[in-house]
Amino acid sequence: MALLRIFQAIKKMTQAESDTMGLSPVQIQALLFTAHTRSDVATVGNLANMIGTTHVTAVKILNGLVRRELIKKAQKAEDRRVTLLSLTVKGKEIVNKLDNWGHLLEDALLPISEDLLRHFETALDYMVSSLQKKGHLVVSEPCLGCIYFLPNAGDKAAPHYCQMIRKYLTHEATLQECPEHTASIKVHY
C-alpha cells in the first residue's frame, strides 16, 4: 500500500509541476525522451515502451506536441515504417526549462537521512531491475556498461561501436540514452 501512496503523491506533484509549463506529465516525458535518447532510437515505438503505453496512444501524445511545434517526426531512411522523433527549436527551449522538473519530489526527500536514502535507493534499484526483467519497465541508459558497447573501436569521428545496431557512434551519441541498453553486470538477489 505504501508504494501506491507514493505513486499517487508523485503523480500529483508531477501534474502540478507540468501545469506550470502548460503541458501534461506524459508530454514532458515525451520531450525528455526525445531530448535524451540517441537520435537513431528515438522512435514512436520506443517512446511507447518507455512510458508503458500503446503505439496508438504514443502517436496521440506526439501529435499534440507536433501541433504545438515542439517535436518533429520523420520516417527512418532504412525502414519507412519507423518514425524518428526530434525536438524543434521551440521544443529545445522547453526542455532547457525542465532542469528543475521533479524538484518537488526531491524537496520532499530532504528531511530523510543520507543513510536511509542510500538503503532506500538500493531497494528501489532491485525493484526496477525486477520490473525490467519481467517486462514491466523499460530502462534507458547511455552506452557505457552495455554488453553491446565497444569503446574506441573506430576512428576519431566515430570512435565507438554498437554491436547491436552494427554502427559506429560519435562520443556524444554514446552519452545519450538508448532503450536497447543491456547492462553488462547482472543484479543478483
Image (spheres, grey):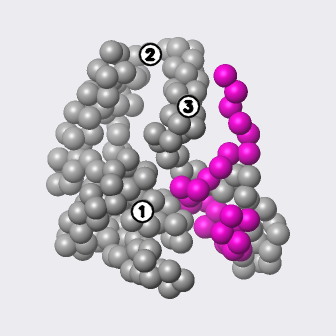
Residue drawn 72% across the image and 79% down it = 157
Task: Give coordinates of residue 105: x percent, y percent.
Answer: 35, 31
Q: Which mark is residue 112?
A: 2
Using the image as rendered, state which of residue 171 and residue 71 is in the foreground.
71
Magenta stretch holds residue 169? yes
Q: Are marks 3 and 1 in contact (CB under 8 Å)?
A: no
Relative height, residue 179 to residue 69 (above, below):
above
Task: Give coordinates of residue 172: x percent, y percent.
Answer: 62, 67
Using the image as rendered, state which of residue 119 and residue 90 is in the foreground.
119
Q: Amino acid at mark 2?
A: Ile
**Is tag 2's residue or tag 1's residue first in the polypeptide sequence?**
1
Relative height, residue 187 to residue 162 (above, below):
above
- In the rendered structure, which segment of residues is drawn in magenta? 162-189
Residue drawn 27% across the image and 39% down it = 14
Q: Which mark is residue 25?
A: none
Separation of marks 2 and 3 at Cα, in angstroms: 25 Å
Circle 1 sits on which residue? 45
Circle 3 sits on which residue? 130
Quick one: label 1, few (<14), some, or many (20+) residues within 10 Å? Answer: some
Residue drawn 78% across the image and 62% down it = 151
Q: Is residue 97 visible?
A: no
